[in-house]
Amino acid sequence: MNFGERLKNARQKAGLTQKALADALGVSLRTITNYESGKRYPKKHENYEKIASILHIDTNYLLLQGNEDRVSLSAFTDESPEDAAPLFAEAFRTLVRSPRFSENDTDDLMKELLDIYWKEKAARRQ
């Protein structure tokens, strides 16, 4: 389940229309429609927090995908680097704060991320 599907599901469970959610967030109906269709994502982390508060859900529910605690990368791959960085940082924080990750797990994850970064950087130069 992607972000848009989770948002729609949570909105419907809360008994809100798209218009009601848009009004509560202070955004247009089109923005909510775009969120739910997967065309757009909130650019600022505080918007995820506002949505979660209005819908009475955990922010992590909006950021995580599936039952495997996988972060939905689509939430920030379509954004500019300036907008993607805080989203990625929050997604990473969510992962490392998970009770399913030990300190060794988070160390291994960080090593893997750095390895990916350096390999991709080298590949771009070629």
Image (cartoon, rainbow, N blue to C red):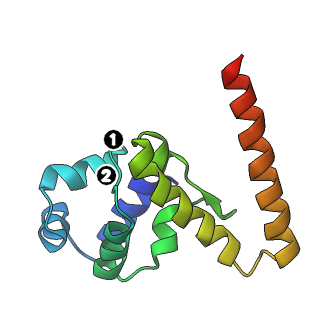
* Rendered residue at 23%/50% (across/down): 33
For residue 12, the mark is none
**Residue 90: horizontal and vertical position, in percent?**
52, 66
Badge 1 amino acid:
Lys
Q: Identify whether 84 is placed above or below 14.
A: above
Q: Please tell me which residue lies in front, 54 or 78.
A: 78
Going by the numbered disc 2, the residue's amino acid type is: Tyr
Residue at 30% from the left image edge and 75% from the top image edge: 50
Of 99 and 9, nearer the camera is 99
Contact (Cβ within 8 Å) of mark 2 with mark 1 = yes
Crowding at dot 1, Cα within 10 Å, few <14 / some 14-19 / many 20+, comes out as: few
Q: Position of residue 109 (x, y in %)?
A: 79, 60
Quarter of image, res 6: bottom left
Q: Which residue is mark 2?
A: 35
Q: Name which quarter of the figure residue 24 lies in.
A: bottom left
Q: Secondary structure at mark 2?
A: helix
Q: For residue 39, which numbered disc appears in the image?
A: 1
Give the spatial CA distance, label 2 vs label 1. 6 Å
Residue 14 lies, in percent from the top left, at 30, 77
Is 104 displayed left or right of 6 in the figure? right
Total marks in image = 2
x, y (%) of residue 89?
55, 62
Report the quarter where the C terminus lies: top right
- Considering only vertical position in the picture, is 28 above or below 17? above
